[in-house]
Image: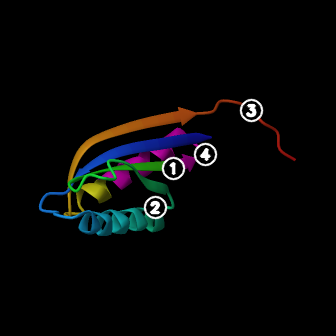
Amino acid sequence: MTIGLLTIIFHLHGVDSLKAKRKIVKSAVERLRSRFNASVAEVDAQDSKQVAVIGIAVVANEGGFAHKQLDTIINFIQNDGRFYVGKIEREIFTSNHDHTFF
């Protein structure tokens, strides 16, 4: 089992209220969840009007698929156009345990 994690900082220029920010972030989160079947949440900077930090997690049966899925998510986000994508952090966790399930 492989777990892929992304932490992405969005910069929202021209947003002047938390309500406007929440609308953009909520839309982006829902689009990511539905399109990529990933766990997505705003994880930091909730009180900032111009910065959002989004956490994304995917689970896969192999590392190659997890990397590909994260690459696709990054490309999708970078082409959104409603915000500037700042720092992106990627982590991959792999379990090498052999399990027998009945």
Say whether residue 63 is magenta: yes
Residue on which disc 1 sits: 58
State which mark lies toward you, 2 or 4: 2
* Residue count near mark 1 (Cα–Cα under 10 Å), binned few <14, some 14–19, many ≥20: many
- Kind of residue indicated by mark 2: Phe
- Kind of residue indicated by mark 4: Asn
Q: Secondary structure at mark 3?
A: loop
- Kind of residue indicated by mark 1: Val
The residue drawn where x is 36% and y is 54% is: 72
For marks 1 and 3, the one nearer the N-term is 1
Determine whether 30 is above or below 97 in the image: below
Q: Secondary structure at mark 1?
A: strand
Q: Are marks 2 and 1 in contact (CB under 8 Å)?
A: yes
For marks 3 and 4, the one nearer the N-term is 4
In the rendered structure, find residue 36 and report the number of the disc placed on it: 2
Residue on which disc 4 sits: 61
Measured in 3D between alpha carbons, the distance from the residue under mark 3 to the one under mark 4, in whole angstroms, is 13 Å
Q: Residue furthest left?
A: 14
State which mark lies toward you, 1 or 3: 1
The residue drawn where x is 24% and y is 68% is: 20
Give the magenta-colored segment's residue range. 58-74
The residue drawn where x is 12% and y is 62% is: 14
